[in-house]
Image (cartoon, rainbow, N blue to C red):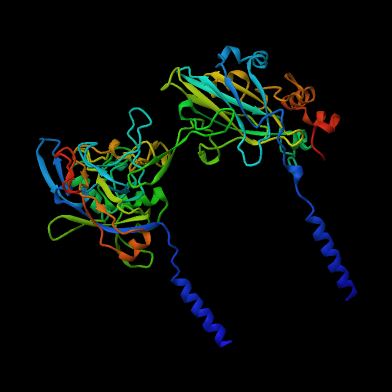
Amino acid sequence: MRTAGISIIVLAATGCTFDEQLPQVDVQGTLILPREAATYTVVNPQNGEETEVTDARAIGPVYLGVFPNIRYDLYDYPHPEMGPVIIDGTPGNTYPYGGGTVGRFDFACFSDLACRISTGRFKSFEDILDWYNSVLGDPVVDEFGAVVDSPDFFRSYCYELFQYTADYELTFISEFVNADGLDQNTLDFTENADGDFEAVFDLWQVTYKPDMKIWGWMDTPSEKFTFSTCDPDQGQQNNKYTNEYYYGTNYSDLLNYPSKYIFDNDWVIQDPYTFTSADADGFRLDNPEVVVTMDFKSGAESATAEAGE
Amino acid sequence: MKILKSSVLIGAAVASASCDRLGRDYLTAPNPDWPGVVHLGEIPVLAASEFQAEADRLENITYARIGAPSDGIYGGATATFTSTGGDVCVIVDPEAVFWNQSVASQGSKEQYSIPDNYRDDGDIDIEVGLTAYYTGSPGYEMGDFAAIYEDSLGNEVRLEFNECFMPGYGSTLDAHAGRGAIEYCTIDTSVHPGKSYTVVLNTYSVPLDDGLLDYALAIVDGGCGDIGQASGGLDECLLLAESREANDLDTPDGDFALLEQAYCNGDIFQFCSNNPDLCGEE
């Protein structure tokens, strides 16, 4: 009986070490955005006066993909290699091996904020109202056009809309008390010693090929603090009472056709991270430190291969 | 003990007898007179006016027949048409008529209470694309509209140039109709006016009763939605009389024509009651 018990324990322990040798890998790394990428120029609508604000809340959603190669001669910014052009007017598909984001669009209860809020950027309701009402001078309004200036009203409106009962259910709020009563912070970016902004990213189940590269871009907010990667006519539809609008969501082919969505002032990776391990198992064994810097400002400079080559 | 021994012997006898069932009854054999891979050639795109009335359809659509493919070979038919520069509707109706028998204890439908004869039904799946992308050899070997793109790291990606999309459950666009049911799709040829398109009719199943699959094919100028609306609906009753006489492809099979007519008129129960040999076994 004792022998059988020991055998079962040994077998179970062996099972825990079973290597499935999957050709896909989970990649975790660090993204560095230069300080300038978190700097937003606020224009006073009354007098046209411009003020620069550096704040993690100004960082747009970041899209990261893994591609076979990056080229510097396709566009004015580094861009993944593309497959054949099949439809006139549509670029070739980049056929990414995988990808992920740092922050994603989330609907913050008012149609005025559709396509304007990314997860991991705002601590609280106060934080959102402070950003729009005070910093940008573009107050949040409800469906009747009334300015929302009370965080408590904001919260109660959200709870009513989504039928939620706690802040932790709202993914655009990043500082909250979780279901176990513990304080949580899910903000993506922190300021590093150089004054730049860093975030940890995850790219799940990337099909591994040696020499594949991580590339991506940050969607810089427009003058109205909107984003070119968000489709305001998609996402969940709100038809409650007199409401008639969509919550907005990202386009579904961002990594396949990035050139459709990258415009001047977006920040792009010029020097992609290259995977050097021979295969997926080798990558898991090597467990390299993955760091990418998004330091190329589209429209402000010319793409060169010097950093990447 | 004696009873146990007898039971074991009987069980063994039953088990060995059941192994004798080969299921040949569910397979069709190739027919030397009707090849499994055929090419119908160029088919004219019918104007809406040539298709709208039932009499015009019976006159103008293409009726054809295909045999069962040899073992290990994909069977089917191909045809080509020249694009109009606008929407073109491709419709195929494999024989014969199929319905689900109504067996519900409540709300059953008397019309479908007698089962369908599944042995007279075949199934064809359509693909349509630019002829330049077709990988098969018409009349010799079936192909598809796929190409392989290899990226700089040697990773191969399958590119699909089939343009015939049929929405299914969950809004996916890769659905196909089942046995005996029509399939159709709209091809937007505006980007390639005057170019050759290939219609691929893949054999999914051949009727078990004769090992031959009759079907009707129509290629019509316009979108399928508009064409269906103008012609009374995109259903079994659009392309009529697809089952043909065994020895004469130009003549409709009389029994099937009556069955189809009964189906389209909602008189299936009465018809099957009077002609049980043309419907399924109860």
When the figure is inspected, residue B223 is found, relative to residue A134, above or below; the finding is: above
When the figure is inspected, residue A129 is found, relative to residue B248, above or below; the finding is: below
Residue situated in front as seen by the camera: B51 or B17: B17
Quarter occupied by the N terminus of chain A:
bottom right
Q: Residue furthest bottom?
A: A2
Residue situated in front as seen by the camera: B267 or B136: B136
Report if residue B217 is visible in the image.
Answer: yes
**Residue visible at 60% across and 21% down in the picture:** B218
Q: Position of residue B12 (x, y in %)?
A: 82, 64
**Residue visible at 45% across and 71% down in the picture:** A16
Q: Position of residue B39 (x, y in %)?
A: 59, 25
When the figure is inspected, residue B141 is found, relative to residue B103, above or below; the finding is: above
Q: Position of residue A131 (x, y in %)?
A: 21, 48
Residue situated in front as seen by the camera: B93 or A32: B93
The quarter of the picture where residue A256 lies is: top left
The quarter of the picture where residue A178 lies is: bottom left
Q: Position of residue B198 (x, y in %)?
A: 52, 25
Report if residue A130 is visible in the image.
Answer: no
